Structure formats: C-alpha cells, structure tokens
Amino acid sequence: MIKRRLGKTGLMVSEVGFGGEWLERHEEAESIELIKYAGEKGINIIDCWMPDPKSRDIIGKAIKENRENWYVQGHIGSTYQNGQYVRTRDMQHVRPAFEDLLARINRIDPASVMDDDRAYIDLGMIHYIDSKEEWETSMHSEYIEYVHMLYESGKIRHIGLSNHNPRIAKLAVETGFIEMILFSINPAFDMKPASEDLDTMFAGYDGEFSGIDPERAELYRLCEEKDVGITVMKGFFGGRLFKAETSPFGAAFTPVQCIHYSLTRPGVASIMCGYDTKEQVDQAVAYEDASADERDYASVIAGAPLHAYAGQCTYCGHCRPCPMDIDIALVNKFYDLAVEQPEVPQSVREHYGALPQTAAACIGCRSCEERCPFGVKIADRMEKTAQLFGC
C-alpha cells in the first residue's frame, strides 16, 4: 500500500483508508476481524465519527495490539444522547463524548483517561461544520477553546475539520491551526456549487454539468499551497456512482475509478472507503495494482450523457506518453496552483522546478491533445507554464 504525507501533520497515511460508518451493522467479532484484515492489507488510517459505544469499542479492540500503527480520525462534537447521534457544541455533552472516545479507542479506564499519557487521538476532528453561522459561532466559543486544550495537552496530536462546504473549508485552511480536513469529494460533487445542505445538492437536478466548480478547485489548490492535507469522505456518493441509473452523470463508475479521481485532486492523501465485507476491502486495495485503463475515470465523464467538461484538465493522465517525457498532468496541476495567486507560491515554484522535465521541454507536437478526452489545448498551456515559471 502506497503511503502519502497528510499535509503538515507529517503523517504517512495509506492512500486507501477505512471509513468506519457501517461497523455497528455487524456482529462485533465480525467487524473487529474486518478492521484487522484491512490492516493486514496495508490500510493504516480509520475515521471514527460515530458516537455509539459499539462502533468505538470495535475500533479500539481491533487496533489495541498495534495501536501505534493506526491513525485515528476522532471527532469532537459527535455525541450519543438517548441512543441517538447528535451533533452539538454544548460542552456538557461534548466533553464526556470525547472522553468516552479516548477511553474506548485506547482501551483505558474512563476514570483516568485524561491523565493517562497512553490515551490520544491522532487527528482530532472539529466535527461537521458546513454553515458560515456555525463556523463563526464555533470559532468564538468554549468549544474551540476545548479543542485547543486537547491539542496542547497531547490528547489530540493534530487538529482537523470534517466538512462538505468548500467555502467553510477554505476558512479552515486559512486559520493556520487546522492541519487537515476530511472533505466530501467525488466526480459528481465536484461539479456542483457550494451548499450548506449536502442532502439537497442534487435535488431536482436535470441539467448538464459544466465542469469542476471553481470554489472546489480553489479549495484544492489552497490546500496544496498551505500544506493542509485532505482525507476524502463520500468518495462513492453512497454507491450511486456505481450504477448508470443512479449516477448523476447517467454513466457508471467503478470503485477504482472513484478512488483514482479523489487521489488525483491536489492536496488529497487518502480516501476513506466504507466496508461491509472483506471482499469490499479487496476491491478498494486493488487500486494499488490497477492498470491505467482500470483507473480511467476521464473516459466515463467524457462519454456520459450529462457532461460539459470541455477544455478543463482533470489531471487524468490520458495525455501520456509524451515524447519529451513531460509529466503533463503534474505540470498542469502546478500551473493551475500558480495562476490563482497574485504571485507564484514559493512551494509551488520549488516543486515545479524539481520536475525531471518542465514545460519548456515541450516541442509542440500536440500528440497529447489527440488523446485528451476534454479537448484541452495542452501545447498552449505548456507555453504559458514555461513563461510563468521561466523554465
């Protein structure tokens, strides 16, 4: 399993992660075995937004023998009240819910968990903020003070945020203290404007897509520039992308294609896939050995009945091979990262300059353009990139 650096956290996480949402649907022993199996396949990051004791116990018991090998995204503000999940900033519920998470994940006595140095959560997630009002309220509250206290005391080792709205995610990136975000990414979501209500994003949708939403593209570029890592949720759109009749594109994708789409977005380190069975784990980790054809999401998008993505680079790699051995997709990615800023960020300039072949090596043969499913004028972009970077 290939590992990627999760932004400024420095954590090396598996490209394919474990979204734990469905653990409570199965017998405890079965779910524990599923997590252990995923670990054997090289998965080392797991998300625990669930507040119910069963899910938390399952994760804690599954990783207790090699806790140091797992990175846990544990959410602050996800509480269990009267047998129900409740998202809240009310500290009379937030504190005990997080202490319960600490105790169950680390298998430590709840009475001493806050004083026990063995008890920690790798990624302490500010849980699910999608509205501007809630963001502003939370950022000036006892809740955010508690998050900082947990970080300063070592109970959480890094601060993250779970979110579906690129406008709020951009605010998080700009804080400087939020090191990573858990964000909803898939080919369909990326085509839709920001919304404070994810559930209604596609309600009544009957038109064509017009390419990636500018705010989402800006978010990914900003994360790359500021070194804020991204882990991905909802990468499969709840399975809707796997069938043409439920896909907003009117065309079906495979799990491997969805995984590849997420992992080609700037800033993304890992995609949290949900699993019910070992077979589903196998399908996800098969990504690592998949061929270029098996990973190819671009042909699905370009051939979909509901599509208008012309002229935009999706970093899909169809343009390869280049006779000058230019990594065209990566050059395009650095160009897109650079042009959105008043000045080229130094980090982007350094990464671009480290490429074995820069855009200046382009001979203008345009053979790449014949292979591009979206009609991108690649040679023109290479010329502009060479002028922008000076090489």
Image (cartoon, helix red, strand yellow):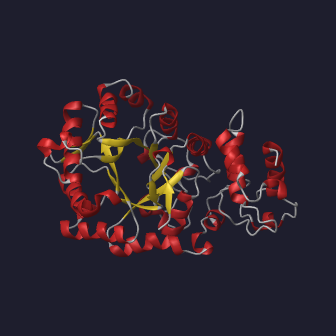
Q: Residue at x 13, y 48 (%)?
A: 109
Q: How many marks?
A: 0
Quick check: 280 above or below 327?
below
- Which of 49/122 is in front? 122
Q: Position of residue 317 (x, y in %)?
A: 68, 64
In the foreground, 201 or 37: 37
- Give residue 170's position: percent from left, percent from top: 52, 36
Q: Residue furthest front?
A: 117
* Residue 38 placement (x, y as % from top left): 35, 68
Vertical arrangement, residue 287 with respect to residue 187, above or below? below
Residue 217 sits in which quadrant?
top right
Residue 253 seen from this side = no
Q: Nearer the viewer, residue 114 or 43?
A: 114
Above or below: residue 225 compared with residue 363: above
328 relative to 87 in the view: left or right: right
Q: Nearer the viewer, residue 305 or 334?
A: 334
Side (left or right) of 312 relative to 104: right
| Residue at the top extreme of this rendering | 140
Write the residue at 41% across / 42% down: 160
The picture places residue 117, in percent across and down from the top left corner, at 24, 44
Residue 370 in view here: yes
Q: Is residue 127 left or right of residue 329?
A: left
